[in-house]
Image (spheres, helix red, strand yellow):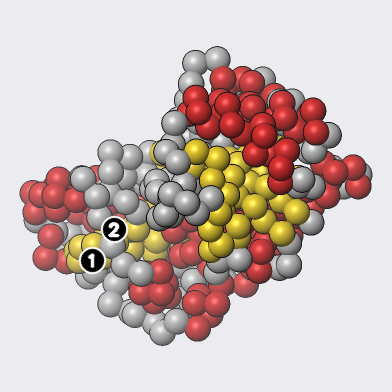
């Protein structure tokens, strides 16, 4: 199958999780024998180099710079030249998604819109992006609901979750220094304060914790830990490679998820696959609770006091280093879901 990805920006030039999801999907498709063309603004060097092969994917220049107007104007001809079987349009900015949908209709080429939920919004274009494609893929029910609020029919939106590599989960060594772990970019949505208050509730008990990640709020979080007089029992690791994070999760008892905004809680998923007891503070803007619904090693809380109680009760839950029930989130398994989506919108009747 020949799949044409459409995204003005890519993960090579912009730090967005939705773009990284697209890069990973394109690479995995190429690894599994599919032809993949990625239409984008140029992120590689050389003005005279209109295409660039990377990770088995042919990146093809539509514009030299990420300029929305120029990109959308040149996109129809670029899409026509690819001759793809399916168009995979990455949401954000939505204007190029709407153009890809119109061109797909003219070319009789089905269009899947991958809507992660972190793309830029443009007045009036969200509704066009949500309604013009054959199928919208979202990482969670939370994002699916938001797409439906933009007018998409329920039957044209399908959840395709984020995926993880289970090989390091199975093979990485165990780092058992910490009882409780939090991991995420420390930005305005991190909401680490809930965990700090919960740990302060257990000041007289024996525990150790790690906060993994970096970001603009790190200094404020470290200051809050000092003010609560628990900083001597918390290790701020900064950003760590995936394998090191996995080693910490495999040795920890509890993974705490308290962020206020999360289209998909990937680090929580990794921790659950590593056997952690996943404790999620319910937040209206986060999908994290979806990962622990009906899961025996998952808990939902609504306050620091409840979080402290669950951390205490976790001492009675046997430790594990791998949870096979999350194998459905492995890269290959989720890629199969994408391929099912492509085949469905091509008319095989799977959807």
On the image, the x and y values in percent for residue 339 come to 76, 55
Q: Are marks 2 and 1 in contact (CB under 8 Å)?
A: yes
Name the residue that disc number 2 marks.
213
Q: Quadrant of the C terminus?
A: top right
Q: Give 72 or 315, whichever is nearer the viewer.
A: 72
Quarter of the figure with the N terminus: bottom right
Left or right: where 51 falls relative to 37? left
Cα distance, mark 2 to mark 1? 7 Å
* 62 on left or right of 319: right
Out of 313 and 190, give the one closest to the viewer. Answer: 190
Depth check: 12 or 260 in front? 12
Q: Residue at x 54, y 46 (%)?
A: 61
Q: Which mark is residue 237?
A: 1
Label located before the other in sequence (2 or 1): 2
Residue positioned most to the front: 48
Q: Position of residue 346 (x, y in %)?
A: 85, 43
Residue at 59% across, 31% down: 74
* Left or right: 157 as drawn, with respect to 197: right
């Amino acid at each position: 199958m020949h799949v044409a990805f459409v995204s003005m920006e890519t993960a090579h030039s912009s730090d967005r999780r939705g773009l990284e999801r697209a890069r990973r999907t394109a690479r995995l498709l190429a690894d599994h024998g599919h032809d993949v063309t990625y239409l984008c603004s140029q992120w590689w060097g050389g003005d005279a180099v209109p295409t660039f092969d990377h990770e088995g994917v042919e990146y093809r220049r539509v514009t030299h710079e990420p300029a929305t107007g120029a990109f959308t104007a040149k996109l129809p001809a670029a899409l026509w030249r690819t001759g793809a079987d399916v168009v995979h349009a990455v949401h954000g900015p939505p204007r190029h998604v709407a153009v890809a949908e119109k061109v797909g209709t003219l070319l009789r080429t089905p269009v899947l819109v991958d809507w992660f939920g972190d793309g830029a919004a443009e007045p009036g274009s969200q509704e066009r992006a949500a309604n013009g494609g054959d199928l919208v893929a979202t990482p969670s029910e939370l994002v699916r609901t938001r797409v439906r609020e933009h007018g998409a029919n329920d039957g044209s939106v399908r959840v395709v979750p984020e995926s993880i590599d289970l090989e390091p989960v199975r093979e990485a060594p165990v780092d058992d220094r910490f009882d409780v772990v939090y991991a995420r970019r420390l930005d305005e949505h991190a909401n680490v304060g809930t965990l700090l208050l919960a740990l302060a509730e257990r000041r007289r008990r024996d525990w150790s914790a790690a906060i993994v990640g970096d970001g603009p709020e790190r200094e404020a979080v470290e200051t809050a830990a000092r003010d609560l007089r628990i900083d001597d029992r918390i290790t701020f690791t900064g950003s760590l490679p995936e394998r090191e994070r996995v080693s910490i999760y495999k040795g920890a008892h509890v993974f705490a998820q308290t962020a206020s905004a999360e289209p998909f809680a990937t680090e929580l998923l990794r921790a659950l696959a590593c056997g952690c007891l996943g404790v999620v503070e319910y937040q209206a803007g986060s999908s994290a609770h979806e990962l622990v619904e009906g899961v025996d090693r998952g808990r939902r809380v609504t306050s620091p006091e409840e979080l402290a109680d669950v951390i205490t009760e976790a001492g009675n839950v046997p430790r594990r280093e791998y949870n096979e029930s999350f194998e459905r989130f492995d890269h290959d398994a989720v890629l199969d879901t994408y391929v099912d989506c492509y085949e469905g919108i091509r008319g095989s009747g799977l959807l």
